[in-house]
Amino acid sequence: MPDYPELLTPDSLESPLLPSGDEAHLPKARPTFKQWTSEFEGDTYGNKPIVDMDREPMFAELAILKLLQKDGWDGVWVDTFSRKYRTAWGREGLVRLTGERLGLLKSINQRADSASGCFDVYCWREDGVLFAESKRASKDRIRETQLRWLEAALRVGLEPSSFLVVEWHFSGSSLETNKSVGKQVGRPNPLSQSSVAGRARIVRGLDAEPEEKASPSPPYESLEVFFDAYDIDAHDKFLKWRERNWRGYVISRRSPSDGMLHQVDCGHFEHGDKSVSLTRTMKVCSRDRGDLESWARENMGRGLKRCRSCM
Ligand SMILES: [Zn+2]
C-alpha cells in the first residue's frame, strides 16, 4: 500500500465491475479542489474544468500529478486528447517515456488489445507504480474502455493498490477549507506565459514558437497528430504521412466538438493555395479506421461527422 499525499488519501473503495464479471476494489480519494475563476485563454480541451492549484490554472489531471510529485512520485499525465505524455502544460511539459515505464504501458495495452482507457496519471517511485484516474464527482464515471484497460493491468500483475480513483469536487465557495488546494483567497495571478504557452497558442494564433520537436510516445500507438500549434513542420509531415499511408484515414478536427472523418485521398486535402497550411486544423491520422473512431469517441464525444464526398 503506497502512502499518499494528504489530499489524495483514500477514504473509501470504488468497486467497478470488470468486463470479466469480477469486481475490482480500488482505493478512492475525494479531494476538494479550488476552481480557477479568472479568465482562461488556453485550450480547455472542450470545456474541461480548470483547477486553481497554488494560483496556477490547470486541469485536474495535472493537479493530481502535482500533488503526487510533491510527495516524491515521478510521473506523467497520459494526455490521450493530444496523445502526449505531459508533466505540465505547454511544450516544456512534454515528455517521452522509455524503458520499463513505457514497457509496462505497452504490456497492458497489448493485454487490453487497445491503447485507450489508460488511467489519467501514471506515476512511479522506487517502491512501485500508481495509476490515478481523475473523476469529477457526479459528472464523470469510469468508462468501458477504462474497465477493459484496468482488467488488463490487473492481469499483467498490478495490485489494486497500484490504482487510485480521485473523485474530486470544487469547493462550494471561494473560502478555503483545510483540505482544499491553494494557500489563500486572493486575486489570482494573471496567467503565466510558461504555464499555458503550448495551449494558449491554439487560440491566440500561430505566431509563437513551435512546440518541441521530439515526438513523445503516443498513448495510441497507431495514431499520428499533425497540427501547426504543436509543430511548425506539421504540414510537411502530414503530406509525407499521406504518401506513405494512401489507404489511411484522417480526422480533420476543427474544435473538440467538431471534426470530420475522411479517407486520406479525399479531395478536401487538395488545395490550390500552397501557402495555406493543411494542418492549421488539427489532423489526426491512422491507417486503422477503428482506432480513429475510438479516439474520437473518447475525445470528441459525438462530434465526429463523416465526409460526404469520400466516406
Ligand atoms: Zn473527405
Image (cartoon, grey):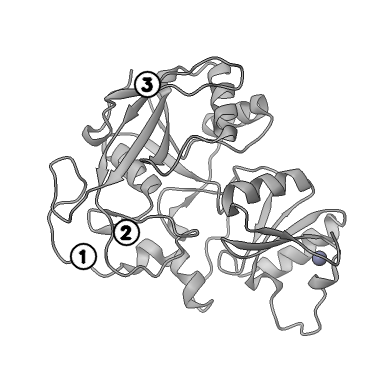
Quadrant in the picture for residue 174: bottom left
Q: What amino acid type should be assigned to the residue bearing mark 1?
A: Pro
What amino acid is labelled 2 in the image? Answer: Pro
**Relative side of 60 to 120, left or right:** left
Comparing 40 with 139, the one in front is 139
Image quarter of residue 65: top left
- Front-lying residue, 39 or 207: 39
Residue type, mark 3 in image: Asp
Whole-percent x and y of residue 290? 75, 44
| Badge number at residue 127 | 3
* 270 vs 307: above or below: below
Q: Nearer the viewer, mark 3 or mark 2?
A: 2
Q: Which is more N-terminal, label 2 or label 1? A: 2
Give the Cα distance between marks 1 and 3: 37 Å
Point out the image quarter for the C terminus: bottom right
Q: Which mark is residue 57?
A: 2
Q: Tell me the tag on residue 216.
A: none
Judging depth in this view, the residue of 46 and 164 nearest the camera is: 46
> Residue at the spot x=86%, y=63% of the render?
310
- Residue 288 is situated, as x and y percent measured from the top left of the image, at 78, 46
Classify 115 as above or below 244.
Answer: above
Which residue is identified by label 1? 188
Judge from the rendering whether residue 15 lies leftward or rightward of residue 280; answer left or right. Answer: left
Q: Secondary structure at mark 1?
A: loop
**Residue 151 in picture, x, y percent from top left:** 56, 22
Q: Residues within 10 Å of mark 1 (few under 14, many from 20)?
A: some
* Of callouts 3 and 2, the N-terminal one: 2
Q: Position of residue 193 (x, y in %)?
A: 35, 69
Which quadrant of the figure shows ligand 1? bottom right
